[in-house]
Amino acid sequence: MTSRSFEGRMPALTGATGWLNSAPLTTEGLRGRPVLVSFWTYTCINWLRQLPYVRAWSEKYAELTVIGVHTPEFGFEQDPENVVRAVRDLNVRYPVAVDSDYAIWRAFDNHYWPALYFVDAEGAIRHHHFGEGDYEQSEAVIQELLTDAGVEAGSDLVAVSAAGFEAQADWNSLGSPENYTGSGRSEYFASPGGLRSGRDASYAVPSKLSLNQWALAGEWTVGEQAARLNTPHGYLVDRFRARDLHLVMGPAVRGTEVRFQVTLDDRPPGEDHGLDVDADGRGRLTEQRLHQLIRQRGPIDERTFKITFLDAGAEVFAFTFG
């Protein structure tokens, strides 16, 4: 038997508001099989970088049940259509419990995206991991739990080659933290007068931004979770240091489209463009999700990022970096 500590019993899964890729699963029905529970939300860059490992474990270990628990961070992630689209687009094939009411999140007393809980065949939680990394250790735990259940798991580890959003961060050059544009959790906001929450306001960009400061220009309404542009040609500026820059954003109204233009140090990004823009920095918002705008190919230093929305109706939630 594994010597790993007992961390409690696996809670019930009855609070799910729906299931994808599977009929509803129950804790009792899973007895006899090791289980990996993965808490996620589809705009989380940290989970996206963990996903290729969870996907690979699900494919490699037939006697392991992987359950993704989708618990939303932002309001639009509660929309069932958005979750269905994310599961399809991100190639998530294992069972997913839709946890829009946070019932399973609370049952596990979870506080993090991503979070992994490793459950043995008797229904006991034997290990957990919060955040990215430690993939070799996590897979070793899976192998231990399978061995304890009488399954030959071997000791070889999966080989993952990730690209796009799923590529691992360039940790050595990363000098910018995740940040939010909504008034509830925003930091480093530099527009004169600060964020004016809950009302229409005109914003301007200061003459200079320090590292990790950001600012708005134009007519915006800043709410608890997001900043919404009310008139065309407003923009957002951020001073950052990272290989990758992403924004969680989308059109405020479903079915509409918002055109935008990105620059790096006042020039088109060229070969440093991300997945969601071209070399000239042009892109379009058609859905609410994480957008990769910058992936630098050369040496990493402080840069000034600017995104100008050519149409009204953009809604911006968060910056993430990699």
Image (spheres, grey):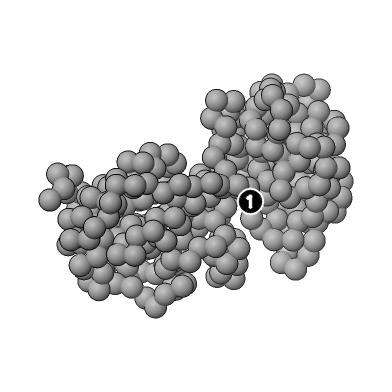
Left or right: 249, with 115 as reference point: right
**Can you give x and y, in whole percent of width and height, for residue 202 in the image?**
80, 41
Number of marks present in the image shown: 1
Is 125 left, or right, of 70 in this rendering?
left
Please name the residue shown 18% across and 60% down the image: 149
- Where is residue 25? Give x, y as percent: 33, 73
Q: Nearer the viewer, residue 180 or 126?
A: 126
* Kind of element beneath mark 1: strand
Which amino acid, by three-letter code, is at mark 1? Leu
Q: Which of the 4 image quadrants contains residue 193?
A: top right
**317 horizontally vs 49: left or right:** right
Figure check: 57 above or below 168: below
**Mark 1 residue crowding within 10 angstroms, few (<14) / some (14–19) / many (20+):** many
| Residue 273 to residue 283: above or below | above
Disc 1 marks which residue?
A: 290
As drawn, 11 above or below 188:
below
**Residue at 83 percent of width and 53 percent of height:** 259
